[in-house]
Image (cartoon, rainbow, N blue to C red):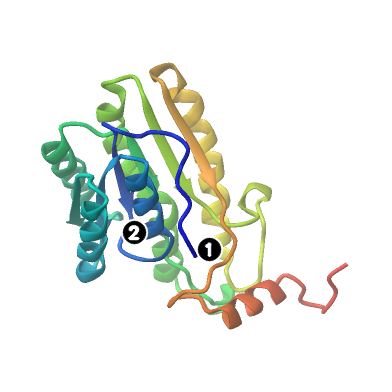
Amino acid sequence: MKPRSLKLSLKNRVALVTGGSRGIGKEIALTLGRAGASVAVAYHTNKAGAQKAVEELRRLGVGAMSAATDVTDPVRVKELIESVTRQFSRLDILVNNVGDFEWKAVADSTLEEWQRIFDSNLQSVFYISKAALPVLRRHRWGRIVNLGAVGAERAFGQAKISAYSAAKAGLVAFSRSLALEEARYGITVNVVNPAIIDDAELSLDEAERVHDARFPVGRRS
């Protein structure tokens, strides 16, 4: 399918996309690049995927870089923001697209597993947003886009993904609060709640299981 082009220009803007080496994150990075933005692709372990994304961005004629990081580590996050600003001298757009997923009932979950889901889906957004705000404020124009999950704005609950559901609902509340705080600096904060996509981490068969888990007694109406 031919990619859509944005009907706006992001020329001279710089974007940072976490989890940008594959899936939704990579397509977001490429879409921003097609609109003229320079793009930093942050990744955790998928170096090859990140480099491929950078190559595709450069073929679009825009600036691009990749950077390894761990968004659950505030020290690594601060280093990421510094690396991007060294490369491009500014940062205008931050897309938070990282979030682990665990299919497990509360009774079977460990404290460590629960914390890992919250760290990747919620704490990470706090860390990177806080680190990026001083840079975003410089030009009194900034955009923060956080990737949630379908139903998060309604505080959805589904069996076997309690930590993920709670973290994504918390992300919506966090984003609303941050938007109110940063509006005076020309910074907007929004959440995009995409539906389930078919990828290596969550197949469409698994998606059906997630959907069916919402109806434990077999009723959908």
Left or right relative to 58: residue 121: right
Which residue does the image show at 21% across and 52% down from the upper left?
58
Farthest residue toward the right? 221
Q: Amino acid at mark 2?
A: Gly
Q: Relative to residue 91, is residue 30 depicted above or below? A: below
Farthest residue toward the left? 86
Q: Is residue 70 visible?
A: no
Q: Is residue 7 visible?
A: yes
Q: Amino acid at mark 1?
A: Ala
User: Which disc is residue 19 wearing?
Assistant: 2
| Mark 1: few/some/many CA within 10 Å (<14, 14-19, 20+) | many
State the residue in front, 150 or 171.
Answer: 150
Quadrant housing residue 50: bottom left
- Whichever of callouts 1 and 2 sits on the residue coming sooner in the sequence is 2
State the residue in front, 215 or 67.
Answer: 67
Question: In the rendered image, which residue does mark 1 sit on?
Answer: 163
Measured Cα–Cα span from mark 1 to mark 2: 20 Å
Proximity of marks 1 and 2: CB atoms separated by less than 8 Å = no
**Image quadrant for the C terminus?**
bottom right
Which residue does the image show at 22% across and 57% down from the upper left?
54
Quadrant housing residue 127: top left
State the residue in front, 106 or 145.
Answer: 145
State the residue in front, 17 or 103.
Answer: 17
Image coordinates of residue 205 in percent, x first then y, are 60, 83
Image coordinates of residue 174 in percent, x first then y, are 50, 39
Image coordinates of residue 139 in percent, x first then y, are 28, 20
Farthest residue toward the front? 2
